[in-house]
Image (cartoon, rainbow, N blue to C red):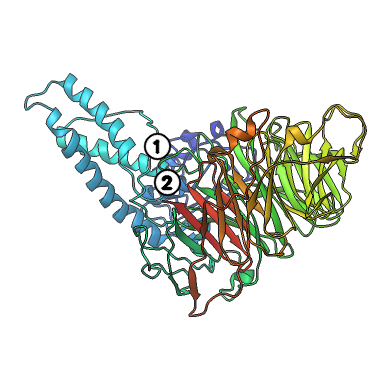
Amino acid sequence: SLSKLQLKTGDLDPRLFSRLRHLQKLDLSDNLLDKFPNSLTLPDLRVLNCNNNKLEDVTALKQFPLLEELTYENNVYLTLNDDYKVMFLLQNLRLLNGKDITKLANHVRRVNTRKLTSKVTAHWEKFFRDQLPEKYTAEQVKSIKKKFLQSVQTNVVYGPSSLSEFTRWRVKMIAEEFLAYSLGVELNSDTEPEEKTDENEEESTESPREAAEDVAQVTVTRSKRKRNHSKSSPGNKRSKSQASTEEEAAEDVSAEPLHFLQCHSKGNSREDFKTQLWSCVFEPVLDSGARKDPIVSSSRTVATCGGESVCLIDCETGTVLKKYKVATEEFFSVAWTTLTMVISDSRKKPHNILAAAGRRGIVKLIHVAADFCYGEIKAHKKPIATVCFSPTQETHLFTASYDKRIALWDIGIPDCDYNFKSSQLLVLETASIPLRIALVPTCPEQYLLAGCEDGCFAWNIKLDKGQKSRPFEAIFQFPDDESMTTSHRVDGLAFLNDDVVVSKSSKPGCIYLWSWSRSFDAKGKGCQRTMSAVILAELEWSTTDMSYLTLSTCPAKEYVFCGDEKGSVWMYNLSSYTTAWGSPKGKRSERRISPTQILKWPELRVNGEQPPEILVNNVVADPAFTYLVVLTSVNITAIWKKS
């Protein structure tokens, strides 16, 4: 046991270790190792523990061919791709991070290798074989090999894109072996082409950490169908919990339902159709990591919350990648930020951090890549309704609570040991419970807008002003039958672009679009002024008086989305209106704007029964509008994909 000795890689002297010919168990946990030296030897090593280090690469572990048990949890830079690499490299490995991986490892070594080998061979035959003359020079061979390696790593894809790094690594290895065998030459290449993913080659995989976890999940994949089909074939996948789900009926839609997941169940019960799902946010794309969509550089990973859990879902495959549970919590809101974190060797890397909050008034901070909830902020004594990060200050987090306060926090940046310091920068006093918050896109460090139980308010949040606790600066009036009113519940609020605000009030059947710049008088003096919202248009929506069915926007595509009390999603493409609204004398659209489309909830049968009344609490598209994630009141997450 060499744990907790502050050991660095240079402290592992190969001359010493190579003499330990019969060592079978080695514990190197809780040290500062960033990699393994290549020549430690240890020919009889069977069990290795490297938990809580700073490892960045696992390939040097191949020097321990008899290894049967390996643990390396809490090494922040190791990912699912590294799990697959060690499964391939260590033929005798049975346990990885405490989970039995025998079956998955066999699949990785055999099926995965077989499929990739046939793809690599086919790529050579189709594109490169004829480029090589019958008699070739060493220079010609070198040139074609370089091109082939680059091309094959770019174009041969297999499995979910969350494993694209592993796939590229294996493809390069197979291609080098193939060339050495075919042309009789050794090859070294360091090409790192950009990743691409082929949508049609998907293989459902899961990390060993989740493989044994019983996540009750209803999954429906609709067979590919042409538009205008009157009926689709029944769902053709079964969930891990074997809940059988049938669905019928299809609209003339521009989005296809991909998956129906039941992954927030209390106690993993497949009978749970009561847990309400509230919030979902797509993960920001990191240059180095988040699973990119095959067609657009937009994330396909979404964080969802409801009940006692937060889930991370791959929208394309429907795989629940990660799940965080707090038994005594009910989560209401999640938000992402990207922090540049420094490790011991002073290398800075961007990492996505997820904030999750709810009934207990506590914000949990989760470093997703490391599977680690590294801290919490006791933000409020009452439940937190919603959270959001500043788009310009990555450590600034707003929390809106039932205590009628919106607080601004600096969450700090964790050091290499996850020590961090948070501080409260500001408290905004609200007259009623805040439900939704939005920062004004043109001045996100100056103004915050909030939809509350009793109206729509704005605050000046500029930090150079002295006072830490502030009343609202403005309250907005909206039309109400014949007159204007400030008193109404605003349970939906988002910006469509830099100026157009979309808000939903408790007035049945109506969503307002209004201009921030024309409504808010920035020059006026004093607080708590009443201002009239300059209405640009009204959207026609359900006549329900049901509250808390929130809306969202996709600014890049100029879309508004809002779910209703029947499981449907109302979609509004407003691209033909925004230019006119943006002109200085832009007129109000006289007629209510009808939805471009309404996606109807398909007829689902779970264990032979149809779920009860389905409310759509939230619906969110990724920034490029490839996927649409629908959160319901019956513990079902529906994922649609734009056709």
Relative to 259, residue 377 above or below: above
Front one among 510 and 381:
510
Residue at the spot 54% in from the left edge and 69% down from the top edge: 216
Q: What residue type is disc 1 on?
A: Glu
Q: Position of residue 298 (x, y in %)?
A: 50, 40
What residue is shown with label 2? Answer: 161
Residue 195 marker: 1
Quarter location, residue 570: bottom right
Q: Are marks 1 and 2 in contact (CB under 8 Å)?
A: yes
Q: Classify mark 1: residues with Cα within 10 Å, few (<14), some (14-19) or many (20+).
A: some
Q: Position of residue 295 (x, y in %)?
A: 41, 41
Q: CA distance from mark 1 to mark 2?
A: 9 Å
Q: In the rendered structure, which disc, 1 or 2, sits on the residue that comes first in sequence?
A: 2
Quarter location, residue 237: bottom left
Q: Position of residue 419 (x, y in %)?
A: 73, 40
Q: What residue type is disc 2 on?
A: Ser
Tell me, yes or no, if residue 278 can be seen here. yes
Position of 634 with respect to 202 (left or right) is right
Residue at the spot 24% in from the left edge and 45% down from the top edge: 119
Residue 13 marker: none
Front one among 462 and 232:
232
Front one among 113 and 569:
569
Relative to 59, residue 617 above or below: below
Q: Position of residue 481 (x, y in %)?
A: 78, 55
